[in-house]
Amino acid sequence: QTGYITLDSGYKNTGATESAITFLDGEEGILRYRGYPIEQLAEKSSFIEVAYLLIYDKLPTAKELDEFSDRIKRHTLVNEDMRKILDGFPYTAHPMGILSALVSSLTAFYPESLNPNQSKEEVDLSIIRLMAKLSTIAAWSYKNSVGHPVNYPKNKLDYCSNFLHMMFAYPTEEYEINPVVVDALNKLLILHADHEQNCSTSTVRLVGSANASLYSSVSAGISALWGPLHGGANQAVIEMLEAIKADGGDSKKYIEKAKDKNDPFRLMGFGHRVYKNFDPRATIIKKTADEVLTALGINDPILTIAKELEEAALTDPYFVERKLYPNVDFYSGIIYRAIGIPTEMFTVMFALGRLPGWIAQWKEMREAKEPIGRPRQVYTGSTERDYVSISDRS
Ligand code: SDX
């Protein structure tokens, strides 16, 4: 091999690309989408407006936002044959597996998306279709897991209300839209919308760099996000908090387990590859969790356990030395639970939020005509040796 190969497993110190989409500073706990601080966007914007900002690099005018929102609404229906694919999944199927399968199946229903030389308008239509259909697919994956009939989107509803309707309405009764819930969902989706070159986004860019379609690239990103060390952590956090509660609620015992090198147990929702200070999203989500539970009159004992864990981790030398602060996944599950989202749907909610980020990053990579991603390695295997016929082998 010519030249030096610098080994950087986990790409801890590798800049894989140049990007103008999201800026984060791990030391200062700064996160901005296209230059706008997420604190302001979470407070003042909507998820669909943030999606527009990420994808088209500008805050839309009222007219642009209405057009974007209406275009999405007109594509929320999925091909009826998708129900046949959905029906093939047992009700025990994890919704993330259904999500990646159905997103990949969009390449079958829209084969033109496979053309790497689509016009700008055609790429834009592919983007609108995916933004619109993922919420329907997500809600349908939930309905499949509970054996209930799917709901069709209602175009008179805004994006978040429509998703909640598709998740929780029944043929027997409408879902009553609660503004507190809609506001909390908007905030959560905004806070998940992009996060520069995290594992799933890097996957979307790498798959897309081979000229694979947007749908195939995002389907791969969904699979990467499913990992419990990544987006799957929000489900793992609630399962961890439930286990601590079931085991008597002794958070100190679990802090010690997390520190024990011989114990594989990790405090899920703590630590981050980049944020070596607090995760600014966790700060906002923690505040929102308090607001939502109060507004909905919910007293959730696992929130108390979560706060005890956070308190202990912020003072325990093991966590302080390793700068292990609560991350975006630590409190998000408590809000999802409060608004009725079941635990196995938490990572699907992460995917719904992260979609505009994946789309923006895939579009940026394609427009920059980036070369196919193909890292090298440091070889540690056998030196050259000759073939041995099977009769001479031991
Ligand atoms: C997300 O990249 C992104 O931006 C991701 C994300 C996004 O928006 O896309 O922010 C979303 O994925 C948030 C992270 C969700 N994952 C979890 O909450 C799972 C628990 N946390 C981790 O496993 C871990 O902290 C990572 C995966 C998040 C980061 O891993 P790193 O950077 O590779 O750090 P590491 O595993 O090398 O840990 C460093 C040290 C180790 O101890 P030592 O070997 O140095 O003694 O900290 C320890 C680890 O054992 N450690 C933990 C811990 N996380 C790290 N110990 C106990 N509990 C934990 N949660």
Image (spheres, grey):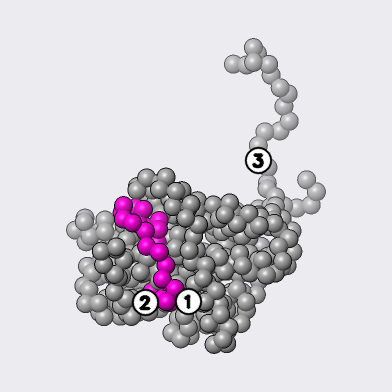
**Rendered location of residue 277, percent (x, y):** 47, 73
Can residue 90 be seen? yes
Q: CA distance from mark 1 to mark 2?
A: 11 Å
Q: Badge 3, how many Cα within 10 Å: few under 14, some, many 20+? A: few
Query: In the picture, residue 289 is in which quadrant?
Result: bottom left
Q: Examine the structure image and report whether residue 145 is included in the region drawn in magenta.
A: yes
Residue with the mark numbered 3:
380
Q: For the point 22% across and 73% down, which residue is it?
A: 298
Q: Which residues are magenta?
A: 139-161
Label 3: state its secondary structure: loop
Given this view, does label 3 or label 1 mark the residue nearer the observer?
1
Q: Secondary structure at mark 2?
A: helix
Residue toward you, 304 or 340? 340
Q: Position of residue 54 (x, y in %)?
A: 58, 75
The alpha-carbon separation of the residues under discs 3 and 1 comes to 47 Å
- The amino acid at mark 2 is Val
Residue drawn at x 34%, y 52% is 145
Helix or strand or loop: what does disc 1 sit on? helix
Instruction: Look at mark 2 in the image and give the residue it sits on.
Output: 182
- Judging depth in this view, the residue of 295 and 309 nearest the camera is 295
- Which residue is the site of mark 1? 47
**Considering the image in quadrants, where does the N terminus appear?**
top right
Q: Position of residue 57 (x, y in %)?
A: 62, 79
* Image vertical order of residue 177 relative to residue 11, above or below: below
